[in-house]
Amino acid sequence: MDKLVSLAKRRGFIFPSSEIYGGLNGFWDYGPLGVALKRNLKDAWWHDMVAGHDELATAAGAPSPYEMAGLDCTIIMHPQVWKCSGHFDLFHDWMIDCRDSKKRYRYDHLLGRRAAHRGKQVFVTTDASGDDAPAELAARAQKFFGLRAKQANEIEWVGEIEPLATAITSGGASLADTLGPDAMAPGTLTEPREFNLMFETRIGAMASDEDRAFLRPETAQGIFVNFKNVCDTSRVRVPFGIAQIGKSFRNEITPRNFTFRSREFEQMEIEFFCRPADSAEWYRYWRDRRWKWYLDLGLTAGKLQLREHGQDELSHYSVGTADIEYAFPFLAEGEFGELEGIAHRGDFDLRSHMEGKLVRRDGELVVETGEDGKPRHRGSGKDLSYFDDISRERYVPHVIEPSAG
């Protein structure tokens, strides 16, 4: 990874943000060649998905003709948007702190393995990933037991490398006997706790808690809240899509892997609105078309895979999701990481912004209520349904979302 970062800087593609002041973790500046490369990618996406979609859609075998429109929404939106979308309550990772090193880690990023030497045992952890993890664990164990390099083979390893969370759940480790990635002794890691990934800010000169707002963690919600505006002003008919390219922000606990997990990044997203009865067919169309798009760009087929999510992976709103994954060089041999996700979101988003935050109960999406029986986060109350003046149907469209970061 260091070689990739160094090469990108030397060639003028990407520089660390605020580098003359020591940089800012998770933020990157695109240099002259980086800007040109990113612009080419965005232009290709916009042409193929929006401006020139007619000819390409016909060639790709779309279920029916459809229209595309563009949008550019603000980065800061009304806070209620994020409460009804679920981001305010659910958009979090689990973090864990080390009382010794004062460092913070993503709980699900820590890998570990039990090591023993002359009756002394410890569960050693590292935040390194891929092929770097085994060597890092070996070095940590050697240092903990006070061994020289030639004595490293005296360490007895118990079990395989696994996530710390898995080891604790199965009883193979406890926080009391876990050695943190940068700690000198076991037992210094705190209990995991939730960490909301949205950047918080304040609006106004005399800002208080009532003026709290957030930098958007995704571009999608701006499209949903403008659904009616686009319908009323553009004369589009379902099925149609709204596309947006723009900045998003996620306050990652531990940014890593260069630009692939950063705190400020750009997204290219489409929200495609269709009749509920046709949504499964449109989901297959967009999944296959986005897969072909990456191959047509020239990416090596053997480095790409299309993977459908299992039922246990699906978000509470998702009817189906597929990831286009790439064999990134920072992953272990044979592993793939997400490049783009194509999600069948059903009518979750439009209904949430009409009625309030939705949750799934007994297989049905219902408005979440508090102890008083009232909606926990109220929706706008606006009618975001669609009326087809030809078939005379009124319905809340289903949404297919191809989203690349």
Image: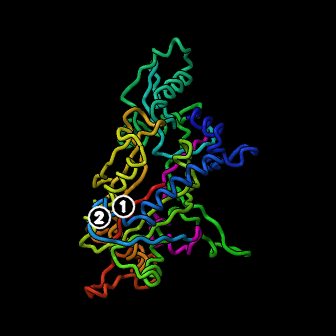
Label at residue 62: 2
Q: Nearer the viewer, mark 2 or mark 1?
A: 1
Q: Is residue 399 visible?
A: yes
Q: Position of residue 58 (x, y in %)?
A: 31, 63
Which quadrant holds residue 181? top right
Under mark 1, the amino acid is Leu
10 Å neighbourhood of mark 2: few (<14), some, or many (≥20)? some
| Residue 282 in which image quadrant | bottom left
Query: 383 or 193: nearer the eye?
Result: 383
User: Residue 168, can we see it?
Assistant: no
Specify the farthest residue to the top: 150
* Along the line of sight, the residue nearer the viewer: 154 or 229: 229
Q: Residue furthest front?
A: 55
Q: Is residue 212 left or right of residue 230?
A: right
Percent across and percent down for residue 251 are 57, 55
Q: Position of residue 356 (x, y in %)?
A: 42, 77
Residue 337 located within the stretch drawn in magenta:
no
- Left-right relation of 204 to 327: right
Establish if 310 lies above or below 215: above
Residue 85 lies, in percent from the top left, at: 45, 70
Distance of label 2 from label 1 (alpha carbons): 9 Å
The residue under the point 64% across, 66% down is 201
Mark 1 packing: few (<14 Cα in 10 Å), some, or many (20+)?
some
Q: Which residues are magenta?
A: 74-99
Question: For this rendering, which residue is in front, 136 or 52?
Answer: 52
Write down the quadrant of residue 3 in the picture: top right
Q: Earlier in the sequence, mark 2 or mark 1?
A: 1
Q: Residue at x 43, y 49 (%)?
A: 339
Q: Label 1, secondary structure: give it.
A: helix
Which residue is denoted by mark 1 in the rendering? 56
Q: In the rendered view, would you say 331 is above or below 28?
A: above
